Image (cartoon, rainbow, N blue to C red):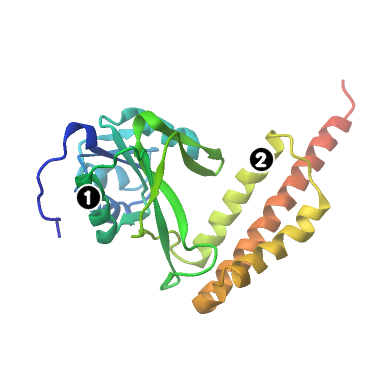
Amino acid sequence: MMPDMKKPRPPSLKISACVTAGNEEDKIAACLASLQWCDEIIVVDSYSKDRTFEICKQYTPNVVQHPWEGYIAQKNYIRSLANYPWILFVDADEVVSDELREEIEAEFERGPGETVGYQFPRMVHYLGKWIRHGEWYPDMKLRLFRKDCGYSGGQEPHDRVIVTGPVKTLKAPLHHFTYDDMSDHINTLNRFSTISAKQKAANGEPFRWRDLLFRPPWRFFKSYFLKRGFLSGKQGFIVAYISAFGVFLKYAKLMEIEQQRRAAEAQPTK
């Protein structure tokens, strides 16, 4: 259902919703439907092999195909395409809840004042349940910001918005439909751990046994006990356990990269 029409926002408060997508035909429609209240929607599609591009054209004329450059570079590219002063970053597997939309609109009706960015919790739907405890919630994300005061930074594959100026926290959640099933979760974990390990190697971070031995169990303890993941039942246990395994994979792959580099250096030159 479309939200009730309200008076147009003044030019200084217009919002460009920016969505990066790739092979998301099963999720992109819900994402874009939740953004119809914004002043424009821009989609950058990384040459999807499914129907993502065609579906996006049904919701907005502003659909651009652009080669995948990485999570950070792709976000900065779509930021450059935005026509309005405020940017709302949303991933293709995310949906702006009605409550979050209403909270944002109320903020802009009052006027943001000196605020240059808004962060809000992201709530994940996983294995048939909304996860409300553990390291996945509240997963605060700064996604709404003034274009002239923010950009994407961080370390691959975890981009984040960096702003200069005051940030306000909203209460309503951004809904995240991150994994289709357990296999999808494991495949993503494998891909992300490879990206992270390569990034650490590129930054010159050495492999250390203590990282491989102690960081995974600490991650499980923090997620399941300190952040009360146990309150999310069996899903909470699975999230904590797989997250810990992801940390193990990251440092094991860093060890592998280092071994491969040393083996290459030991080869006699011709």
Of residue 125 and residue 136, the one placed in the foreground of this image is 136
Label 1 element class: helix
Considering every residue shown, the one lying at the far top of the view is 270
Q: Position of residue 4 (x, y in %)?
A: 11, 55
Q: Quadrant of the C terminus?
A: top right
Residue under the point 63% across and 45% down: 196
What type is the residue that disc 1 sits on?
Glu
What type is the residue that disc 2 sits on?
Lys
Sequence-wise first label, 2 or 1: 1
Q: Quadrant of residue 94?
A: bottom left
Q: Is residue 114 above or below residue 101?
A: above
| Label 2 with label 1: CB-CB less than 8 Å | no
Residue under the point 58% across and 50% down: 191
Q: As drawn, is 25 to the left or to the right of 222? A: left
Of residue 112 and residue 137, the one placed in the foreground of this image is 112
Write down the residue under mark 2. 198
Q: Is residue 237 above or below residue 242?
A: below
> Can residue 60 be seen by looking at this rendering?
yes
Q: Is residue 151 above or below residue 180?
A: above
Of residue 61 and residue 123, the one placed in the foreground of this image is 123
Q: Quadrant of the N terminus?
A: bottom left
Q: Position of residue 2 (x, y in %)?
A: 14, 56
Q: Which is more foreground, mark 2 or mark 1?
A: 1
Write down the residue under mark 1. 105
Q: CA distance from mark 2 to mark 1?
A: 41 Å
Residue under the point 81% across and 42% down: 259
Q: Position of residue 235 (x, y in %)?
A: 51, 74
Q: As drawn, is 148 to the left or to the right of 68? A: left
Q: Which mark is residue 12?
A: none
Label 2 element class: helix
